Each structure stands twice: as structure tokens, then as C-alpha cells.
Amino acid sequence: MLNKVEICGVNTAKLPVLSNEKTMDLFRRMQQGDTEAREELISGNLRLVLSVLQRFNNRGENADDLFQVGCIGLIKSIDNFDLSQNVRLSTYAVPMIIGEIRRYLRDNNAIRVSRSLRDLAYKAMQARDALVNSLGREPKVEEIAAKLDLPTAEVLFALDAIADPVSLYEPIYNDGGDPIYVMDQVRDEKNSDRVWTEAFNIKEGLSKLGEREKKIINLRFFVGKTQMEVAEEIGISQAQVSRLEKGALLQLRKYV
């Protein structure tokens, strides 16, 4: 009882495991109209759904809901499995289970995407699966767009629109110690410690300049005026502005 884990009333600790030979035999019986064989195939492969659920365990979604959606993907894979292909059921079923769960997460996402955009994205995903089978590799977006006879940018936009949002607190690496999260890899160039320190040092350096040098630096680099415009405003020559500017910049470099 201590090891009992129930999802949707199913005791996952007691789920059966089917051998490949037994699976093939059940498929042959199912294709002859044996409904009990189909049910046994489904229950005998529920562990595939459980293994896929581990990929989505940090989404904050209800495990029972995801399990039921994953079961739909499993049933679809069983009903569409081709015995003539030299592949195991798990190889065929896992991508379909993942796809079903991802569709569920997208459709229930708080970020709403228009139906037409979602439909286009699903067509692109179907085209991608077809190209994988025909090419034997992951197709480029340009190839998917060509198959759909649509602009590449339009297909890319649709796929981006339904991409799952990633939490800043999603772990991306863990070697047994403290995990590294997405937020640890995100850098704000405008608000980093280095930028803040440089701004502080520049302010400190400006306070050490004379009033005229300070005004020249302000007009040149904060207002954006030319040396000639600064010269006219201050009432000195452009050559003097250039000389004073160079001296002021040399002084500032001591602080930055």
C-alpha cells in the first residue's frame, strides 16, 4: 500500500507489462475484430503514458487530466498502428502521446491563440511528420512551408504562436546539487550589475569635471549635439570644444 500510486483510479504499481510477442499477437486478434484484445493492448501499454507524463510534471497541470489526455494519444496510436512497419509500438506511440498532451496544453493555455493560427500550426506539424517519414530527418521550416504552399514567415509565426511558454523556474540542469534554472541563464543587458556600476562610475566621474567640461559632455553624448553646435551654444571655437572634450573623456576613463 505504501507504493500504491493512483491516477484516475488506476493503480500504476500494478499495471501489466506486455512482451513484444504478446503485443503482436494482440494486434492480430484486434484486427480480426477482437475488442477484448484491444482493451488488453491499451491497459498493457499505460506505462508508456506514465513515462511521458514525467516530461510535463513541472507544468502545474493536474496529473489525472494529463493522464487521460495521454491515454487518448495511446488509443489513437493503437488504432492506427501498422503491423507491416518494422517498428515497435512504443516507438510509434510515444510521439503521439506527447503530441496529444501538447495540444491539450496549448488549447488550455492562458495565452489565447486564434483558431485559424492554431489550425495552421497543426497543419504544419502534420506536414512536418510526413516529411520526417519521407526524408528520414528533421525538415527545415522552409521545406514545411513549401509542402503547405505558404510563406515561410507565416508558418514560422504559427508554430511560434503555439509553442509552450517556459517557466523561468524550470530546471535545465542538475548534477545532484543545486539545479540551474532558466532564469539563471537569462541576462538583462539593460539592468545588469555591470551596467549599473558603469552608470554610477560615470556619474562619479562627471562630478569631478569642471562646469564647462561637464556641459560639453552632456551636450555631446547625452543630448547628441555636434562639436560645432556645442561651440556655438557655449561661445567658444570648435577646436576648443574638441580639446576640452578629449580632456574630459580622459578624466572619465579613470572611473569607468
Image (spheres, grey):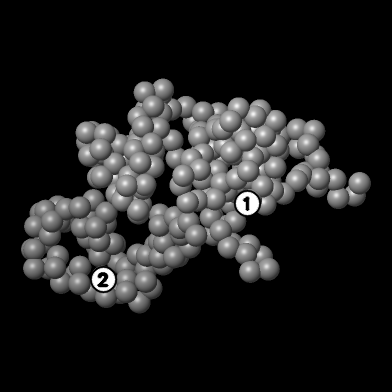
Residue 20: mark: 1
In the rendered image, the vertical position of residue 159 relative to residue 190, given as above or below: above
Residue 152 rendering spot, x and y as whole percentages: 24, 40
Instruction: State the image coordinates of residue 166 (x, y, percent, origin top left).
Output: 52, 46
Q: Is residue 117 visible?
A: yes
**Snapshot quadrant of residue 5:** top right
The amino acid pointed to by label 2 is Leu
Whichever of labels 2 and 1 marks the residue nearer the N terminus, that label is 1
| Of the pair 118 and 45, the residue shown nearer to us | 45
Q: Quadrant of residue 248?
A: bottom left
Q: Crowdedness of circle 2 by 10 Å Cα count: few (<14), some, many (20+)? A: some
Q: Is 192 on the left or on the right of 5, as rendered?
A: left
Q: On screen, 16 above or below 100?
A: below
**Number of labelled discs?**
2
Give the image location of residue 124, x and y in percent: 35, 36
Q: Position of residue 92 (x, y in %)?
A: 51, 45
The residue at 56%/46% (across/down) is 89
Identify the image quadrant of the C terminus: bottom left
Q: Secondary structure at mark 1?
A: helix
Q: What residue is at 24 percent from the left and 58 percent from the top?
A: 221
Which residue extends farthest top?
Answer: 115
Is 227 left, or right, of 209 in this rendering? left
Q: Residues within 10 Å of mark 1 (few under 14, many from 20)?
A: few
Q: For residue 249, which numbered disc appears in the image?
A: 2
The answer to which quarter of the image holds residue 234 is: bottom left
* Nearer mark to the viewer, of 2 and 1: 1
